[in-house]
Amino acid sequence: MSGTVDTTLAGLEKMGRRAREAARLLAVTPTETKNAALRAMARALRAGAPHILAQNRLDLDDGRQAGLTNALLDRLALNDERVEGMAAGLEEIAEFRDPVGEVLEMWNGEKGIRIGKIRVPLGVVGIIYEARPNVTADSAGLCLKSGNAVILRGGREALRSNEAIAGLLSEAAAGAGAPADAVQLLATTDHESSIALMRLPYLDVLIPRGGKKLKDSVAENARVPYIMTGEGNCHTFVDASADVGMAVDIAVNAKCQRPAVCNAMETLLVHRDIAPRFLPVGLAALAERGVELRCDEESRRLVSLPSVKAASEEDWGTEFYDLILAVKVVGGLDEAIEHITRYGSGHSEAIVTDSYANAQAFLARVDAAAVYVNASTRFTDGGVFGFGAEIGISTQKLHARGPMGVEQLTSVKFIIYGEGQVRG
C-alpha cells in the first residue's frame, strides 16, 4: 500500500515528494479519468467491507478499553450502512461538476491583451482528523475530484479502520488511471508525526479537523497555510417570543441527535422572560435523553432535576463531544450575542424566535459560518447544503468558510493571451 510510511523525517519528505508529483499529474487528469477512479474507489469499498468492518471492530475494542465515551465510539463505529454511505458518497462526487479549468472571467486589458481567471487545484492537501474513519473516504474523494493529492493522518482511535479504507482507495484509484500517490495515509498517530506533517514543506494547505487542542497545535506549529475546521462550540438562543414546543424540539435535536459532531449544540441560552415556561419542559426533555445539564445559578433555581449540576466558567468555552450541555439564562438578545461572541468558535449558531426584528438582528450580528433562525444547528453539513460530501466546515474567513466541498478545494490562476504586446 503506497499510503503506509515510516515516521522519520526522510520518510515524510519522500511522501511529500510523491504527493507533489501526483498533484502535478492530477492537475491535468481528464474529468472522465477522475470520475472512473471515484467509481472504482466506491466499488472497492463495497467489496472490501468485510475487511474494513473487521478492522473497525478491533479499533472499537481498543476504544472501549481506553474508556472512550459512547458518543466518541459512535463517531468511530462503522457498519454496513455507513460503509455503503461512504461508497455512495464517492459516486455522488463523481457526478459533481468538475471545477478544474472552469473559466470564471475574461476581459480585455492594456494594449489589447486578453486576461482570464480560471479554477485550478490547490496542489497537495494535508488533512489531520480524529476518530471518524468516514473522513478518510470523503477527503480522498473530494481531493481527487478537485485535482489535489492528499496526505491523510487520522487519529489513533481509528488507525486500523483508516489503513483498511485508505489502502483500498489508493489501489482502486491507481488501477483506474489516477496517479499512484494521489491518496496517501500517514499510518502512525504519535504527536511527533503530527507536528512533522504540519511542517511538511510539500503541502500547499493543511486542513485540521478536530477540537481546540488540535487547533492550538496547528496555530503553534504549522509552517504551511491552513484552514481551520471542526471546532464547534455551538449555541442555541431561545428568545422571549419563541414557541416553547418548537424550542424544545430544536434543542433536543441539536444536542442529542449526534452529540459528538462539530455542529451539535454545546450551550443553551434562554431569555429570562421565557425561562420559567421553557426550562422545566426543555431541560426535562434533555434529561430524559441522558443529557448532563450544567446550569448557571438562575436556571438551577427554576429546575429541579438530578442531572443538573453547577456550570463553571470553563463549561461556557467547552466543546463536550458528549451528552453534556451548558445552560444559561440571559437578559435578552444583546446579552446572548455577547456570550456567543465571547465563547463561540464561529461554527454554527441558532435563535428560536417569533420576532422578525430579533431574527434579522441575530443573523446580522452573529459572526459564524452558519447562522440559523428556528432550526437546529445539526443542519450545517455539506450534504444538506447541496455540496455533497465535505472535507470539513471552515470556521475562518479565508479562503473558504462553512462546509467545504469540491469547489472550495480550488484556487484561481490568471491566464493572459497576447499577440506580441510589450509594456511601454
Image: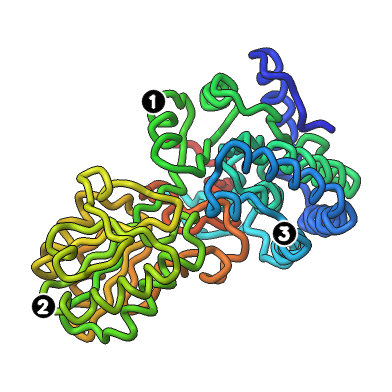
Give the quarter of the image for residue 300: bottom left
Query: Which numbered disc, 2 or 3, marks the residue closer to the eye?
Result: 2
Q: Residue at position x 62%, y 28% from top?
A: 189
Q: Which residue is mark 3?
A: 86
Q: Which residue is mark 2?
A: 273
- How far apart in space, not on screen, are marks 1 and 3 (Cα)? 33 Å
Q: Residue at position x 23%, y 58% from top?
A: 295
Quadrant containing the C terminus is: top left
User: Percent position (x, y) of residue 17?
Assistant: 70, 24
- How far apart in space, not on screen, are marks 1 and 2 (Cα)? 44 Å
Question: Could you tell me the amino acid type at mark 2?
Answer: Asp
User: Percent position (x, y) of residue 399?
Assistant: 43, 47
* Helix, strand or loop at mark 2: loop
- Label disc, if present, on residue 33 of the rendered structure: none
- Disc 1 crowd, CA 10 A, few/some/many (<14, 14-19, 20+): few
Q: Residue at position x 33%, y 67% from top?
A: 371
First in sequence: mark 2 vs mark 3: 3
Q: Is 16 left, or right, of 130 in this rendering? A: right
* Vertical relation: 141 (above or below) 207: below
Question: Could you tell me the amino acid type at mark 1?
Answer: Glu
* Vertical relation: 386 (above or below) 62: below
* Vertical relation: 203 (above or below) 417: above
* Helix, strand or loop at mark 1: helix
- How far apart in space, not on screen, are marks 2 and 3 (Cα)? 46 Å
Q: Residue at position x 12%, y 63% from top?
A: 298
* Helix, strand or loop at mark 3: helix
Quadrant containing the N terminus is: top right
Give the quarter of the image for residue 267: bottom left
Question: Could you tell me the amino acid type at mark 3?
Answer: Met
Q: Which residue is mark 1?
A: 220
Q: Of 309 and 417, which appears nearest the observer?
A: 309
User: Percent position (x, y) of residue 38?
Assistant: 79, 56
